[in-house]
Amino acid sequence: MKKLMLMALAVALTGVAWAGSPALTNPNATKTDVSPIPGAPGVFAAGDSIWGFDSQTGPNDNQCLGVEWVPLTDKIYVTGANTGVDPNRVYVYDHNGTYLRMWNQPAASTGWGGRDLAWDGRYLAHGTGAGTTVYLCDTAGTYLARTITGPQNPIRGLAFDPATRTYWTAGFATTIQNFDSAGTVLSTTASTKNTYGMAWDTITVGGPWLWVYSQDGTPACQASQFNPRTLVYTGVAYQLTMGNIAGGASFSGHWGDAMGKYGLFCLDQALVVDRVILMELGNLGAAPANDMSMQTVIGPRGMVSPGATVTPEGRALNAGTANQTSVPCVAWIDSAGTRIYTGAATIASINAGDTARVLFSPQWTSGPAGITYNVTMFTNLAADARRSNDTTRANVMTFTVVTTLQAPRGTAPTIDGNIQTAEWLDANRYDVSDVLGNGGSNPGGSPPGTCYLYLKNDSTNLYFGVDNNFGSLADYDQLGLYFDDNNNDAWQPDTSEGNFWWAYLAAGNRTIWRGWLPGPVTAPLVEPVPGMVWAVAVQGSRHHYEGNVQIGPKPPNANYFLNAALGSTVGFYMYSQFNGAVQRGWWPTAMPNAGFSNPAVYGDLVLLRSSGVEAGEPVKAPARAALYAVTPNPVKGMGIVRFALPAKSEFSLKLYDVQGRLVRTLAAGTREAGVHNVGLSGEGLAKGVYFYRLQAGAFSATRSLVVVR
């Protein structure tokens, strides 16, 4: 029923003379349009259909709507209304248009569900059936808790500008609007196009350009070029003559390399089967004989431990037609605009069309925690005929991932929302910033130093302080502390276990608390709450929480308490959220976003009987070397590998595939006695089983992990 309604609307709109629409021009008036079949013959020009595939048959959905090609995965993603039955879905296709899998859109995305898609370099974005919500998810289909409030209802056309990191949207005869990740509208331009798709073009001369794919003209599939700098249509437009009704759109920078083309992926809501068609926009030129490209940075990227020794690694492609030998490659690592590392490598030989792992030397050692580095890698073939694809870049930061927290004995602080140094000197302080973005921070996560957690106890109470970098109270600011009192990876009814959840409500300038099922307190409670004391205040540019939870058996008249004894370990997870939308604090760092209600993935919080903060208290060396299970496992995005050394020693931690081939060196060098953490990025790894091996002196151990997408 949904699709019939759309077709009727499109027919009604076709042929209407919309005032102010620019005259259509085609620089290639003699173009030859051909059926969208791979390898179809023809003399192609801008506006031609040069490739395509059936998007309907694989998922059995005749209501395909939006489309986005993601260069990171080399896959095509299509939104679908699931033949008119909720839940709505996102479908995944490989480079050849073969259907692979699907995932459900959020339950609130009902009706038509998300229309067009956009890719911001890390997350896919799409709207909802009715409303202004923009959802964000990774390429595995995991949605962030954070959403964006868009400027239109619904969000139809959607594109992302990577330079300004902002979005563009438009709908049926509505305005074209540019908005940021906070939902702030940056520009509004009148438009009479019946927009369904948008795409951001970074290649066409004079750009970048915004392409508006609309249900205009005959057939109702029109791609119009819009200048995002002057906010006017340029007058250049193409009609997809093989199409029927326009859906979403996506820009393809190098999908057509084999044909020497680039263009727009256009979702065609066809009469027979829905399909994705690649419309040519320009000619990349025939593949030259000599063309080397550095495709991606494998490592370092994402996150590394402070003081980690890493072998920089990239992946190169021979995009030319000639085999190559002795190809020089260069790696740079910069910090705050200063080059701190230069590495070199040589590809001995690589055939045309093949890829190669590139290992740079010397090794690089990261600095202390909290530093962000910019990694640049490029091929440097002297006879390279196309330099524009030589270089790739990535960012990496140093961050100490802590998998166990300790609350030492100390004195009771004054709970007033002001974390004063003198009051918290006897506490442990941890950086719990959402650096991986697992909690739903802005794309790229929150940088180190965004959120600190202070912990201590006085045998009667567990005291906590949370120091955030947002400096004003906003409606629905939140702090959540989750406890698994007996650390048995489950919540039990009729106990204190669950969520100690605080929120600020601007209406009435008040705070509320709530317990999480299956705990005994499920309804919001207004201050005061027996058994707890909380306070929040703005201190300069920081936002401070202070509070306590009673320790031990249930106290008289207390609704909130921690049913644990000193010396015990409890399961623990926390988040700190700004404006009810963006996580600033998130611990455990590597915990999946969906893990909040699963105590099995929480970290450990030890209630120490003794005083002394970790920074000044000697840590007892492990009795023996050990290699621990990676967390989380399966790995999706980022995992943490932990290992123990009983004494200072040289070590190596390496990753192998199921055939025993070395995939990468995770870390190597010399470490002091203690338990150490190493980040494992799933980027660049095919899904499947891997083995990681620790070698330290005479000790050797191997464990397995699974990478999923």
Image (cartoon, helix red, strand yellow):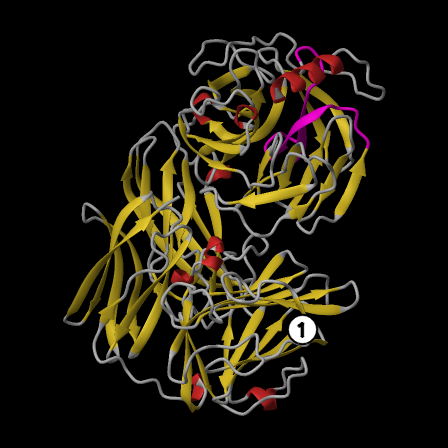
Residue 409 position within the rendered picture, expressed as x and y whole percent measured from the top left: 46, 89
User: At 69% from the left edge and 52% from the top edge, which residue is drawn?
Assistant: 182
**Residue 220, quarter of picture:** top right
Residue 427 position within the rendered picture, expressed as x and y whole percent measured from the top left: 51, 85
Secondary-structure class at tag 1: strand
- The answer to whether residue 379 shows anywhere in this view is no
User: At 54% from the left edge and 50% from the top edge, which residue is drawn?
Assistant: 144
Dot 1 corresponds to which residue? 542
Residue 642's place in the image compared with 637, above or below, is below
**Residue 225, quarter of picture:** top right
Residue 243's place in the image compared with 86, above or below, is above
**Stretch of the chain drawn in magenta:** 190-219
**Residue 287, quarter of picture:** top left
Q: Nearer the viewer, residue 70 or 601?
A: 601
User: At 42% from the left edge and 23% from the top edge, which residue is drawn?
Assistant: 58
Name the amino acid type tagged 1.
Arg
| Residue 542 in the figure: left or right of residue 381 | right
- The answer to whether residue 410 shows anywhere in this view is yes
Q: Quadrant of the N terminus?
A: top right
Residue 87 position within the rendered picture, expressed as x and y whole percent measured from the top left: 53, 34
